[in-house]
Amino acid sequence: MLPTEVSTSFQRGHKTMKLPDNEFRRRVLVGFQVALLGMVTPSLRGITVGWDERRIVGRCFFDGPIGESERETCSDIEAEIMASFAEHDVEVVAERLDAPQDLTTELLDAWVYRRKE
């Protein structure tokens, strides 16, 4: 089951993540892109990711209420990332952030998806 909020160290403005090398960054971003195939729904506004030596976190922002479908989408993405990064703790959470609220302030290390708005 997914937690309802991201740990404090990954909250905006409280990042404690050390910038990894470019190869690891590439692996994380490509891993999320592959995990997103067939998973993007009309209510998904964006997904930002953050990482450090032990953890990978994804925050999925939805427009409107978070229901079982949105939680399941995040769980499926999380499972795909876990399979690719068995040595890391992986957490992918669903968060509500209705348009037109600004996504820019929510950035962790990188965006893997942003809806055109």
Image (spheres, grey):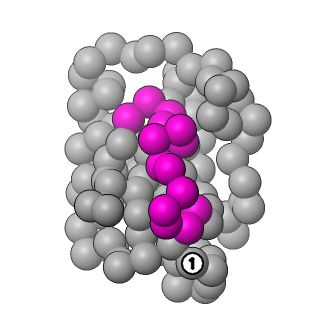
Image location of residue 109, percent across then percent down: 44, 30
Structural crowding at the residue carrying mark 1, measured as other residues with C-alpha within 10 Å and reported as few (<14), some (14–19) or many (≥20): few
Figure disc tally: 1
Image location of residue 56, percent across then percent down: 51, 38
Q: Nearer the viewer, residue 90 or 73?
A: 73
Q: Which residues are magenta?
A: 97-110
- Residue at left 32%, top 72%? 40
The answer to whether residue 44 is left or right of residue 27 is right
Picture quadrant where residue 111 is located? top left
- Residue at left 59%, top 41%? 89
Q: Which SS type dominates the magenta stretch?
A: loop
Question: Farthest residue toward the bottom?
Answer: 68
Image location of residue 78, percent across then percent down: 49, 59
Instruction: For mark 1, give the secondary structure.
Output: loop
Quarter of the image containing the N terminus?
bottom right
Q: Nearer the viewer, residue 115 or 48?
A: 115
Asked whether residue 56 is in view, the answer is no
The correct choice, above or below, for 106 with respect to 17 in the image is below
The question of residue 106 being in magenta is answered with: yes
Quarter of the image containing the C terminus?
bottom left
Image location of residue 34, percent across then percent down: 24, 57
Q: What's the amino acid at mark 1?
A: Gly
Asked whether residue 34 is in view, the answer is yes
Q: Nearer the viewer, residue 89 or 87?
A: 89
**On the image, numbered disc 1 is attached to which residue?**
64
- Residue at left 26%, top 18%? 22
The correct choice, above or below, for 109 with respect to 17 in the image is below
Picture quadrant where residue 97 is located? bottom right
- Residue at left 53%, top 38%? 105
The question of residue 15 being in magenta is answered with: no
Q: Nearer the viewer, residue 82 or 16?
A: 16
